[in-house]
Amino acid sequence: MPANRFRSRSYKRTHKKTPGGQNVLRYKKKKPSKHVCAECGKLLHGVPRGRSYEIRKLSKSKRRPNRPFGGYLCSECTRKHFKSEARS
């Protein structure tokens, strides 16, 4: 019997042949949710969607946009923030 979390159909299943010649059922890991802007909640572009061990293998420039608040705020909210800082 599989573990309780694997009993739902939300996990993708694959059949793998082991070195011993048996066919075994394997469960694919789920992808994490997409990154969103901290202010407006809009989807962020240029931020890859993957588990932490997959993201760690990427170069720093591919992990998030190379600008202030990159990977935290969307470009519109960043622009608004800079304007309000300059005006105050």
Image (tube, grey):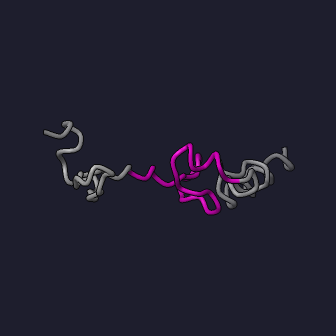
Image coords of residue 71 (percent x, y): 66, 51
Residue at far front of view = 20
Front one among 34 and 1: 1
Count of picture labels:
0
Kindly identify the residue that appears in the image at 22 percent across and 52 percent down: 22
Residue at far top of view = 3
Front one among 79 and 37: 37
Res 7 quadrant in image: top left
Image coords of residue 9 (percent x, y): 20, 54
Image coords of residue 26 (percent x, y): 29, 51
Kindly identify the residue that appears in the image at 54 percent across and 58 percent down: 42
Q: State yes or no: residue 45 in magenta.
A: yes
Tell me: residue 75, above or below residue 81: below
Residue 53 is left or right of residue 5, and the answer is right
Please report the bounds of the magenta region as a residue range.
Answer: 30-58
Prevailing secondary structure of the magenta residues: loop
Q: State yes or no: residue 18 in magenta.
A: no
Residue 76 is left or right of residue 8, and the answer is right
Residue 43 is left or right of residue 8, and the answer is right
Q: Quadrant of the N terminus?
A: top left
Q: Quadrant of the C terminus?
A: top right
Image coords of residue 14 (percent x, y): 28, 59
